[in-house]
Amino acid sequence: MEFEPVIGLEVHAQLKTKTKIFCGCSAEFGAPPNSHVCPVCLGMPGVLPVLNRAVVECALRMALATGCTIARTSRFARKNYFYPDLPKGYQISQYELPIAAHGHVDLDSADGPRRIRIRRIHMEEDAGKLSHDPHRPVSRVDLNRAGVPLIEIVSEPDIGSPAEAGDYLRQLRAIVRYLEVCDGNLEEGSFRCDANVSVRPKGAAALGTRTELKNLNSFRFVEKAIEFEIERQKEVLLEGGRILQETRLWDQALGRTVPMRGKEEAHDYRYFPDPDLLPLSIEAEWIERVRGGLPELPAARKARFVEQHGLPAYDAGILTADRELADYFEECVQRVADPKTVSNWVMGPLLGLLNAGGLSAKRAPIPAAGLAGLLALVGSGAVSAKSAKAVFEEMAASGRSAEAIVAEKGLAQISDDAAIEALVREILERNPREVEAYRGGKTKLMGFFVGEAMKATRGRVNPKAVNTILSKLLNQ
Ligand code: ADP
Ligand code: MG
Ligand code: ZN
Protein backbone atom coordinates (compact mmCIF):
# COMPACT_ATOMS: atom_id res chain seq x y z
CA MET A 1 0.00 0.00 0.00
CA GLU A 2 1.25 3.47 -0.88
CA PHE A 3 0.84 6.35 1.53
CA GLU A 4 0.94 10.10 1.12
CA PRO A 5 1.83 12.55 3.88
CA VAL A 6 -0.43 15.43 4.92
CA ILE A 7 1.09 18.32 6.85
CA GLY A 8 -0.29 21.48 8.44
CA LEU A 9 1.86 24.01 10.31
CA GLU A 10 1.06 26.25 13.25
CA VAL A 11 3.55 29.10 13.45
CA HIS A 12 3.96 31.49 16.37
CA ALA A 13 5.64 34.77 15.49
CA GLN A 14 6.74 37.02 18.33
CA LEU A 15 5.90 40.61 17.40
CA LYS A 16 8.49 43.37 17.51
CA THR A 17 6.37 45.83 19.43
CA LYS A 18 7.99 48.02 22.11
CA THR A 19 5.57 46.90 24.81
CA LYS A 20 3.61 43.79 25.74
CA ILE A 21 0.13 43.01 24.44
CA PHE A 22 -1.93 43.97 27.51
CA CYS A 23 0.36 46.14 29.67
CA GLY A 24 3.07 48.77 29.31
CA CYS A 25 6.03 46.49 30.16
CA SER A 26 8.88 46.35 27.69
CA ALA A 27 8.68 43.39 25.32
CA GLU A 28 12.43 43.44 24.71
CA PHE A 29 14.35 40.16 24.82
CA GLY A 30 17.39 39.58 27.01
CA ALA A 31 16.74 41.66 30.16
CA PRO A 32 17.57 40.24 33.62
CA PRO A 33 14.90 37.71 34.73
CA ASN A 34 11.62 39.17 36.00
CA SER A 35 12.63 42.79 35.40
CA HIS A 36 9.96 43.45 32.72
CA VAL A 37 6.92 42.65 34.81
CA CYS A 38 3.96 44.45 36.41
CA PRO A 39 0.74 43.44 38.19
CA VAL A 40 -1.01 42.84 34.83
CA CYS A 41 1.47 40.41 33.32
CA LEU A 42 2.08 38.82 36.74
CA GLY A 43 -1.62 37.98 36.87
CA MET A 44 -2.41 39.83 40.09
CA PRO A 45 -6.09 39.86 41.05
CA GLY A 46 -8.13 42.91 40.20
CA VAL A 47 -6.03 44.26 37.34
CA LEU A 48 -7.34 44.85 33.83
CA PRO A 49 -5.67 44.14 30.49
CA VAL A 50 -5.64 46.91 27.85
CA LEU A 51 -5.02 45.89 24.24
CA ASN A 52 -1.90 47.34 22.59
CA ARG A 53 -2.87 48.96 19.30
CA ALA A 54 0.54 48.20 17.75
CA VAL A 55 -0.15 44.48 18.11
CA VAL A 56 -3.35 44.79 16.08
CA GLU A 57 -1.44 46.79 13.47
CA CYS A 58 1.15 43.97 13.11
CA ALA A 59 -1.55 41.31 12.88
CA LEU A 60 -3.31 43.35 10.20
CA ARG A 61 -0.10 43.73 8.21
CA MET A 62 0.51 39.98 8.23
CA ALA A 63 -3.12 39.17 7.49
CA LEU A 64 -3.27 41.52 4.50
CA ALA A 65 0.11 40.38 3.19
CA THR A 66 -1.20 36.82 3.06
CA GLY A 67 -4.53 37.69 1.45
CA CYS A 68 -6.65 37.00 4.53
CA THR A 69 -10.12 38.34 5.14
CA ILE A 70 -10.14 40.63 8.17
CA ALA A 71 -12.90 40.09 10.69
CA ARG A 72 -14.66 43.40 11.35
CA THR A 73 -15.25 42.12 14.87
CA SER A 74 -12.99 39.69 16.65
CA ARG A 75 -12.78 38.59 20.22
CA PHE A 76 -10.30 37.52 22.86
CA ALA A 77 -10.84 34.31 24.78
CA ARG A 78 -9.37 32.67 27.83
CA LYS A 79 -7.59 29.40 27.18
CA ASN A 80 -7.45 27.76 30.59
CA TYR A 81 -4.65 25.53 31.64
CA PHE A 82 -2.41 25.31 34.64
CA TYR A 83 1.32 25.55 34.21
CA PRO A 84 3.82 27.54 36.30
CA ASP A 85 4.88 29.78 33.38
CA LEU A 86 1.32 31.11 33.13
CA PRO A 87 0.59 33.21 36.23
CA LYS A 88 -3.08 33.90 35.50
CA GLY A 89 -3.94 30.21 34.99
CA TYR A 90 -5.18 31.07 31.50
CA GLN A 91 -3.70 32.46 28.31
CA ILE A 92 -5.49 35.28 26.52
CA SER A 93 -5.83 34.19 22.93
CA GLN A 94 -8.39 34.34 20.16
CA TYR A 95 -10.58 31.33 19.57
CA GLU A 96 -13.99 31.56 17.94
CA LEU A 97 -13.47 34.91 16.28
CA PRO A 98 -9.86 35.37 15.17
CA ILE A 99 -8.78 38.65 13.59
CA ALA A 100 -8.18 37.07 10.16
CA ALA A 101 -8.89 33.94 8.13
CA HIS A 102 -8.81 32.38 4.65
CA GLY A 103 -5.46 33.56 3.33
CA HIS A 104 -2.70 31.87 1.42
CA VAL A 105 1.03 31.73 0.77
CA ASP A 106 2.29 30.95 -2.74
CA LEU A 107 5.37 28.83 -3.24
CA ASP A 108 7.56 28.32 -6.30
CA SER A 109 8.29 24.62 -6.13
CA ALA A 110 10.33 22.46 -8.48
CA ASP A 111 7.04 21.14 -9.91
CA GLY A 112 5.55 24.59 -10.44
CA PRO A 113 3.57 27.03 -8.33
CA ARG A 114 1.87 25.75 -5.17
CA ARG A 115 -0.64 27.54 -2.97
CA ILE A 116 -0.78 26.74 0.75
CA ARG A 117 -3.97 28.04 2.30
CA ILE A 118 -3.95 29.81 5.65
CA ARG A 119 -6.83 28.83 7.88
CA ARG A 120 -6.56 31.65 10.40
CA ILE A 121 -4.31 34.22 12.01
CA HIS A 122 -4.93 35.22 15.58
CA MET A 123 -3.33 37.31 18.33
CA GLU A 124 -2.35 35.97 21.72
CA GLU A 125 0.03 36.48 24.61
CA ASP A 126 3.19 34.46 25.16
CA ALA A 127 3.85 32.59 28.41
CA GLY A 128 6.91 32.94 30.67
CA LYS A 129 10.00 30.80 30.42
CA LEU A 130 10.79 27.92 32.76
CA SER A 131 14.26 26.53 33.30
CA HIS A 132 14.80 23.28 35.13
CA ASP A 133 17.88 22.64 37.23
CA PRO A 134 19.35 19.36 35.95
CA HIS A 135 20.89 18.46 39.34
CA ARG A 136 18.25 19.46 41.87
CA PRO A 137 14.45 19.29 41.92
CA VAL A 138 14.28 23.05 41.29
CA SER A 139 12.66 25.00 38.47
CA ARG A 140 12.91 28.72 37.88
CA VAL A 141 10.50 30.96 36.03
CA ASP A 142 11.23 34.18 34.16
CA LEU A 143 8.07 36.13 33.45
CA ASN A 144 9.64 38.76 31.16
CA ARG A 145 8.12 36.87 28.24
CA ALA A 146 4.67 36.55 29.84
CA GLY A 147 2.41 38.87 27.85
CA VAL A 148 4.80 39.39 24.94
CA PRO A 149 2.61 39.56 21.83
CA LEU A 150 2.36 36.69 19.35
CA ILE A 151 0.47 36.06 16.20
CA GLU A 152 -0.33 32.45 15.40
CA ILE A 153 -0.56 31.57 11.73
CA VAL A 154 -2.36 28.27 11.12
CA SER A 155 -2.16 26.63 7.71
CA GLU A 156 -4.67 24.24 6.18
CA PRO A 157 -3.32 20.68 5.83
CA ASP A 158 -2.13 21.52 2.30
CA ILE A 159 1.56 20.70 2.65
CA GLY A 160 2.66 17.51 0.91
CA SER A 161 6.27 16.86 1.93
CA PRO A 162 8.94 17.79 4.46
CA ALA A 163 10.70 19.93 1.84
CA GLU A 164 7.47 21.79 1.11
CA ALA A 165 7.01 22.42 4.84
CA GLY A 166 10.50 23.96 4.81
CA ASP A 167 9.67 26.10 1.77
CA TYR A 168 6.42 27.30 3.32
CA LEU A 169 8.15 28.16 6.57
CA ARG A 170 10.96 30.03 4.81
CA GLN A 171 8.42 31.98 2.77
CA LEU A 172 6.40 32.85 5.86
CA ARG A 173 9.56 33.95 7.62
CA ALA A 174 10.58 36.12 4.69
CA ILE A 175 7.14 37.78 4.79
CA VAL A 176 7.21 38.58 8.53
CA ARG A 177 10.70 39.98 8.11
CA TYR A 178 9.75 42.11 5.09
CA LEU A 179 6.81 43.43 7.10
CA GLU A 180 9.11 44.09 10.06
CA VAL A 181 6.59 42.52 12.42
CA CYS A 182 8.93 39.75 13.68
CA ASP A 183 12.65 39.06 13.46
CA GLY A 184 12.01 35.45 12.40
CA ASN A 185 14.64 33.79 14.55
CA LEU A 186 13.91 30.05 14.96
CA GLU A 187 16.94 29.38 17.12
CA GLU A 188 16.08 32.13 19.63
CA GLY A 189 12.42 31.17 19.55
CA SER A 190 10.92 34.37 18.19
CA PHE A 191 9.53 32.32 15.28
CA ARG A 192 8.27 28.90 16.39
CA CYS A 193 6.70 26.10 14.48
CA ASP A 194 4.58 23.09 15.45
CA ALA A 195 4.01 20.55 12.71
CA ASN A 196 0.87 18.43 12.40
CA VAL A 197 1.55 15.28 10.44
CA SER A 198 -0.60 12.43 9.20
CA VAL A 199 -0.47 9.90 6.39
CA ARG A 200 -3.27 8.39 4.32
CA PRO A 201 -3.55 5.87 1.51
CA LYS A 202 -2.53 7.63 -1.69
CA GLY A 203 -5.50 9.38 -3.26
CA ALA A 204 -7.81 8.92 -0.24
CA ALA A 205 -10.11 11.83 0.54
CA ALA A 206 -10.29 11.48 4.32
CA LEU A 207 -7.44 12.68 6.52
CA GLY A 208 -5.56 10.23 8.71
CA THR A 209 -5.08 10.69 12.45
CA ARG A 210 -2.40 13.28 13.08
CA THR A 211 0.32 13.83 15.59
CA GLU A 212 1.59 17.26 16.56
CA LEU A 213 5.38 17.75 16.64
CA LYS A 214 7.06 20.27 18.92
CA ASN A 215 10.60 21.42 19.69
CA LEU A 216 11.45 22.22 16.08
CA ASN A 217 13.85 25.10 16.51
CA SER A 218 15.60 25.13 13.14
CA PHE A 219 14.54 24.63 9.54
CA ARG A 220 16.59 21.45 9.44
CA PHE A 221 14.85 20.00 12.51
CA VAL A 222 11.42 20.82 11.07
CA GLU A 223 12.20 18.86 7.92
CA LYS A 224 13.95 15.99 9.70
CA ALA A 225 11.23 15.59 12.34
CA ILE A 226 8.45 15.51 9.73
CA GLU A 227 10.45 13.07 7.64
CA PHE A 228 10.91 10.77 10.60
CA GLU A 229 7.29 11.03 11.66
CA ILE A 230 5.97 10.13 8.19
CA GLU A 231 8.07 6.98 8.14
CA ARG A 232 7.10 6.07 11.70
CA GLN A 233 3.38 6.42 10.95
CA LYS A 234 3.67 4.37 7.75
CA GLU A 235 5.38 1.61 9.64
CA VAL A 236 2.72 1.55 12.37
CA LEU A 237 -0.06 1.35 9.78
CA LEU A 238 1.67 -1.31 7.69
CA GLU A 239 2.00 -3.45 10.80
CA GLY A 240 -1.75 -3.14 11.30
CA GLY A 241 -1.49 -0.64 14.17
CA ARG A 242 -3.33 2.64 14.78
CA ILE A 243 -1.90 6.16 15.06
CA LEU A 244 -2.54 7.77 18.43
CA GLN A 245 -3.52 11.42 18.30
CA GLU A 246 -0.79 12.85 20.49
CA THR A 247 1.85 15.53 20.90
CA ARG A 248 5.40 14.34 20.22
CA LEU A 249 8.74 16.01 20.79
CA TRP A 250 11.60 16.02 18.31
CA ASP A 251 14.67 14.62 20.07
CA GLN A 252 17.66 15.86 18.11
CA ALA A 253 20.14 13.62 19.96
CA LEU A 254 18.11 10.49 19.21
CA GLY A 255 17.11 11.70 15.72
CA ARG A 256 13.49 10.72 16.38
CA THR A 257 10.17 11.96 17.71
CA VAL A 258 9.13 10.75 21.16
CA PRO A 259 5.68 10.86 22.80
CA MET A 260 5.13 13.85 25.09
CA ARG A 261 1.45 13.83 26.01
CA GLY A 262 -1.95 12.90 24.66
CA LYS A 263 -3.26 15.62 22.37
CA GLU A 264 -5.62 17.99 24.12
CA GLU A 265 -9.00 18.68 22.61
CA ALA A 266 -10.36 22.20 22.54
CA HIS A 267 -12.83 21.39 25.33
CA ASP A 268 -9.91 20.55 27.64
CA TYR A 269 -9.07 24.26 27.60
CA ARG A 270 -12.56 25.47 28.56
CA TYR A 271 -12.33 28.42 26.21
CA PHE A 272 -14.66 31.32 26.90
CA PRO A 273 -14.73 34.99 25.88
CA ASP A 274 -12.56 37.10 28.16
CA PRO A 275 -14.96 39.31 30.11
CA ASP A 276 -12.17 41.86 30.76
CA LEU A 277 -11.70 42.70 27.07
CA LEU A 278 -14.23 44.27 24.76
CA PRO A 279 -14.82 42.74 21.34
CA LEU A 280 -12.36 44.29 18.91
CA SER A 281 -13.91 46.14 15.98
CA ILE A 282 -11.68 47.31 13.20
CA GLU A 283 -12.76 50.12 10.96
CA ALA A 284 -12.50 49.77 7.19
CA GLU A 285 -10.28 52.86 7.03
CA TRP A 286 -7.73 51.29 9.34
CA ILE A 287 -7.61 48.18 7.15
CA GLU A 288 -7.16 50.29 4.01
CA ARG A 289 -4.45 52.40 5.60
CA VAL A 290 -2.50 49.27 6.57
CA ARG A 291 -3.01 47.78 3.11
CA GLY A 292 -1.66 50.97 1.53
CA GLY A 293 1.43 50.87 3.72
CA LEU A 294 2.50 47.31 2.87
CA PRO A 295 5.95 47.00 1.30
CA GLU A 296 6.65 45.06 -1.88
CA LEU A 297 6.57 41.43 -0.68
CA PRO A 298 9.18 38.73 -1.38
CA ALA A 299 7.24 36.91 -4.13
CA ALA A 300 6.50 40.13 -6.01
CA ARG A 301 10.05 41.31 -5.60
CA LYS A 302 11.39 38.02 -6.89
CA ALA A 303 9.19 38.25 -9.99
CA ARG A 304 10.34 41.82 -10.55
CA PHE A 305 14.02 40.88 -10.24
CA VAL A 306 13.52 38.31 -13.01
CA GLU A 307 11.55 40.72 -15.15
CA GLN A 308 13.38 44.00 -14.61
CA HIS A 309 16.95 42.83 -14.03
CA GLY A 310 16.81 39.73 -16.24
CA LEU A 311 18.06 37.48 -13.44
CA PRO A 312 17.57 33.69 -13.35
CA ALA A 313 14.72 32.74 -10.97
CA TYR A 314 17.25 30.99 -8.78
CA ASP A 315 19.28 34.17 -8.24
CA ALA A 316 16.15 36.24 -7.73
CA GLY A 317 14.94 33.77 -5.08
CA ILE A 318 18.14 33.95 -3.08
CA LEU A 319 18.50 37.73 -3.33
CA THR A 320 14.90 38.47 -2.32
CA ALA A 321 14.64 35.92 0.51
CA ASP A 322 16.05 38.64 2.73
CA ARG A 323 14.83 42.21 2.38
CA GLU A 324 18.16 43.78 3.31
CA LEU A 325 20.05 41.62 0.84
CA ALA A 326 17.58 42.58 -1.89
CA ASP A 327 18.03 46.27 -0.96
CA TYR A 328 21.80 45.81 -1.12
CA PHE A 329 21.57 44.24 -4.56
CA GLU A 330 19.34 47.01 -5.88
CA GLU A 331 21.55 49.75 -4.54
CA CYS A 332 24.52 48.13 -6.24
CA VAL A 333 22.72 47.58 -9.53
CA GLN A 334 21.80 51.26 -9.74
CA ARG A 335 25.50 52.02 -10.12
CA VAL A 336 26.66 49.00 -12.11
CA ALA A 337 25.08 48.24 -15.46
CA ASP A 338 25.34 44.45 -15.41
CA PRO A 339 22.82 42.84 -12.96
CA LYS A 340 24.08 39.26 -13.41
CA THR A 341 27.62 40.31 -12.46
CA VAL A 342 26.27 42.09 -9.37
CA SER A 343 24.16 39.03 -8.53
CA ASN A 344 27.20 36.73 -8.78
CA TRP A 345 29.19 38.95 -6.44
CA VAL A 346 26.37 39.37 -3.96
CA MET A 347 25.40 35.67 -3.85
CA GLY A 348 29.03 34.55 -3.81
CA PRO A 349 31.72 36.57 -2.01
CA LEU A 350 29.36 38.98 -0.23
CA LEU A 351 26.99 36.35 1.15
CA GLY A 352 30.03 34.29 2.16
CA LEU A 353 31.33 37.25 4.12
CA LEU A 354 27.96 37.89 5.80
CA ASN A 355 27.47 34.24 6.74
CA ALA A 356 30.99 33.93 8.12
CA GLY A 357 30.44 36.94 10.38
CA GLY A 358 26.78 36.22 11.17
CA LEU A 359 25.96 39.68 9.78
CA SER A 360 22.93 41.15 8.06
CA ALA A 361 23.36 42.89 4.72
CA LYS A 362 22.80 46.24 6.43
CA ARG A 363 25.96 45.62 8.45
CA ALA A 364 28.02 44.33 5.54
CA PRO A 365 31.71 45.21 5.98
CA ILE A 366 31.58 46.41 2.37
CA PRO A 367 28.60 48.70 1.74
CA ALA A 368 26.70 48.41 -1.54
CA ALA A 369 28.34 51.57 -2.88
CA GLY A 370 31.74 50.07 -2.12
CA LEU A 371 31.06 46.86 -4.04
CA ALA A 372 29.66 48.95 -6.89
CA GLY A 373 32.94 50.91 -6.89
CA LEU A 374 34.94 47.71 -7.25
CA LEU A 375 32.70 46.35 -9.99
CA ALA A 376 32.99 49.63 -11.89
CA LEU A 377 36.79 49.27 -11.86
CA VAL A 378 36.46 45.69 -13.16
CA GLY A 379 33.96 46.79 -15.80
CA SER A 380 36.20 49.51 -17.16
CA GLY A 381 39.16 47.15 -17.28
CA ALA A 382 41.06 49.12 -14.64
CA VAL A 383 41.19 46.01 -12.39
CA SER A 384 41.47 42.47 -13.71
CA ALA A 385 38.89 39.87 -12.73
CA LYS A 386 41.72 38.03 -11.02
CA SER A 387 42.83 40.92 -8.82
CA ALA A 388 39.23 41.86 -8.00
CA LYS A 389 38.81 39.06 -5.46
CA ALA A 390 41.96 40.16 -3.61
CA VAL A 391 40.77 43.77 -3.61
CA PHE A 392 37.38 42.62 -2.27
CA GLU A 393 39.05 40.82 0.59
CA GLU A 394 41.19 43.81 1.41
CA MET A 395 38.13 46.06 1.34
CA ALA A 396 36.36 43.77 3.82
CA ALA A 397 39.35 43.69 6.14
CA SER A 398 40.25 47.40 6.04
CA GLY A 399 36.96 49.12 5.19
CA ARG A 400 38.74 51.15 2.52
CA SER A 401 37.51 51.82 -0.99
CA ALA A 402 38.48 49.77 -4.04
CA GLU A 403 40.08 52.84 -5.65
CA ALA A 404 42.32 53.49 -2.67
CA ILE A 405 43.45 49.86 -2.42
CA VAL A 406 44.12 49.53 -6.13
CA ALA A 407 46.17 52.73 -6.16
CA GLU A 408 48.18 51.79 -3.07
CA LYS A 409 48.94 48.19 -3.96
CA GLY A 410 49.63 48.87 -7.62
CA LEU A 411 46.90 46.44 -8.57
CA ALA A 412 45.63 48.56 -11.43
CA GLN A 413 45.34 46.50 -14.55
CA ILE A 414 47.88 47.39 -17.22
CA SER A 415 45.74 48.18 -20.19
CA ASP A 416 47.90 50.76 -21.92
CA ASP A 417 48.91 49.20 -25.27
CA ALA A 418 52.38 50.75 -25.31
CA ALA A 419 53.14 49.36 -21.85
CA ILE A 420 51.88 45.90 -22.81
CA GLU A 421 53.94 45.96 -25.99
CA ALA A 422 57.10 46.85 -24.06
CA LEU A 423 56.38 43.99 -21.65
CA VAL A 424 55.78 41.51 -24.48
CA ARG A 425 58.96 42.55 -26.31
CA GLU A 426 60.95 41.99 -23.14
CA ILE A 427 59.50 38.49 -22.70
CA LEU A 428 60.28 37.58 -26.31
CA GLU A 429 63.85 38.82 -25.93
CA ARG A 430 64.33 36.74 -22.78
CA ASN A 431 63.07 33.55 -24.49
CA PRO A 432 64.71 33.37 -27.95
CA ARG A 433 64.53 29.58 -28.15
CA GLU A 434 60.78 29.52 -27.58
CA VAL A 435 60.32 32.29 -30.14
CA GLU A 436 62.19 30.24 -32.72
CA ALA A 437 60.17 27.11 -31.89
CA TYR A 438 56.95 29.08 -32.18
CA ARG A 439 57.89 30.46 -35.54
CA GLY A 440 58.87 26.93 -36.58
CA GLY A 441 55.25 25.83 -36.02
CA LYS A 442 54.93 25.12 -32.27
CA THR A 443 52.01 27.55 -31.92
CA LYS A 444 50.97 26.01 -28.60
CA LEU A 445 53.76 28.12 -27.07
CA MET A 446 51.36 31.08 -27.19
CA GLY A 447 50.08 29.92 -23.80
CA PHE A 448 53.60 29.96 -22.40
CA PHE A 449 54.19 33.60 -23.46
CA VAL A 450 50.82 34.73 -22.03
CA GLY A 451 51.68 32.91 -18.81
CA GLU A 452 55.01 34.74 -18.59
CA ALA A 453 53.25 38.08 -19.02
CA MET A 454 50.75 37.23 -16.27
CA LYS A 455 53.56 36.10 -13.98
CA ALA A 456 55.59 39.25 -14.58
CA THR A 457 52.63 41.47 -13.66
CA ARG A 458 51.07 39.28 -10.97
CA GLY A 459 47.95 38.86 -13.06
CA ARG A 460 47.42 42.57 -13.62
CA VAL A 461 47.59 42.55 -17.37
CA ASN A 462 44.62 41.92 -19.60
CA PRO A 463 45.29 38.49 -21.20
CA LYS A 464 43.29 39.36 -24.31
CA ALA A 465 45.43 42.41 -25.01
CA VAL A 466 48.59 40.35 -24.42
CA ASN A 467 47.36 37.79 -26.92
CA THR A 468 46.72 40.36 -29.62
CA ILE A 469 50.10 42.01 -29.24
CA LEU A 470 51.91 38.66 -29.05
CA SER A 471 50.30 37.50 -32.30
CA LYS A 472 51.29 40.73 -33.96
CA LEU A 473 54.97 40.56 -32.83
CA LEU A 474 55.45 36.81 -33.33
CA ASN A 475 53.99 36.77 -36.81
CA GLN A 476 55.96 39.75 -38.10
P1 ADP B 1 -5.33 22.35 17.20
O1 ADP B 1 -4.01 21.73 16.88
O2 ADP B 1 -5.17 23.55 18.07
O3 ADP B 1 -6.31 21.36 17.68
P2 ADP B 1 -6.56 22.43 14.52
O4 ADP B 1 -7.35 21.22 14.71
O5 ADP B 1 -7.24 23.60 13.91
O6 ADP B 1 -5.92 22.99 15.86
O7 ADP B 1 -5.34 22.05 13.58
C1 ADP B 1 -4.13 22.65 13.68
C2 ADP B 1 -3.26 22.32 12.49
O8 ADP B 1 -3.30 20.94 12.18
C3 ADP B 1 -3.65 23.03 11.22
O9 ADP B 1 -2.48 23.56 10.66
C4 ADP B 1 -4.23 21.96 10.34
O10 ADP B 1 -3.96 22.22 8.99
C5 ADP B 1 -3.48 20.74 10.82
N1 ADP B 1 -4.21 19.49 10.65
C6 ADP B 1 -5.48 19.21 11.06
N2 ADP B 1 -5.78 17.93 10.77
C7 ADP B 1 -4.68 17.37 10.20
C8 ADP B 1 -4.37 16.07 9.72
N3 ADP B 1 -5.25 15.06 9.77
N4 ADP B 1 -3.14 15.87 9.20
C9 ADP B 1 -2.23 16.85 9.17
N5 ADP B 1 -2.48 18.09 9.62
C10 ADP B 1 -3.68 18.35 10.13
MG1 MG C 1 -2.25 22.63 17.54
ZN1 ZN D 1 3.43 43.98 32.53
Image: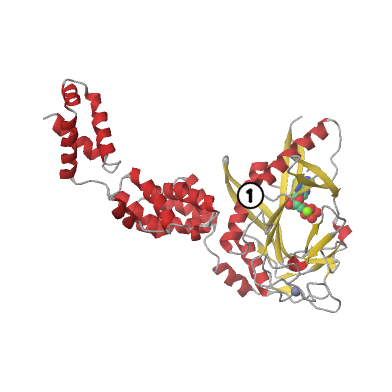
For residue 361, above or below residue 384: below
Q: Which SS class for mark 1? A: helix
* Mark 1 lies within 8 Å of ligand 1 (Cβ measured): no
The residue depicted at 61 percent of the width and 51 percent of the height is: 170
Residue 227, percent from left and from top: 71, 39
Q: How is the image coloured?
A: secondary structure
Q: Is residue 243 left or right of residue 448?
A: right
Is 453 in front, or is 462?
453
For residue 457, above or below residue 61: above
Choose top left, top right, bottom left or bottom right for residue 62. Answer: bottom right
The residue depicted at 51 percent of the width and 59 percent of the height is: 324
Name which residue type carries label 1: Tyr
For residue 36, above or below residue 129: below
The residue depicted at 58 percent of the width and 63 percent of the height is: 179
Is 262 in front, or is 297?
262
The residue depicted at 46 percent of the width and 46 percent of the height is: 348
Which residue is disc 1 drawn over? Answer: 168
Image quadrant of ligand 2 equals bottom right
Choose top left, top right, bottom left or bottom right for residue 468. Answer: top left
Q: Is residue 197 left or right of residue 170?
A: right
**Quick one: quadrant of the C terminus?**
top left
Q: Is residue 324 visible?
A: yes
Q: Residues within 10 Å of mark 1 (few under 14, many from 20)?
A: many
Residue extending furthest toward the left = 476
Residue 135, percent from left and from top: 84, 53
Q: Is residue 99 visible?
A: no
**Quick one: quadrant of the N terminus?**
top right
Is 322 in front, or is 465?
465
Choose top left, top right, bottom left or bottom right for residue 163. Answer: top right
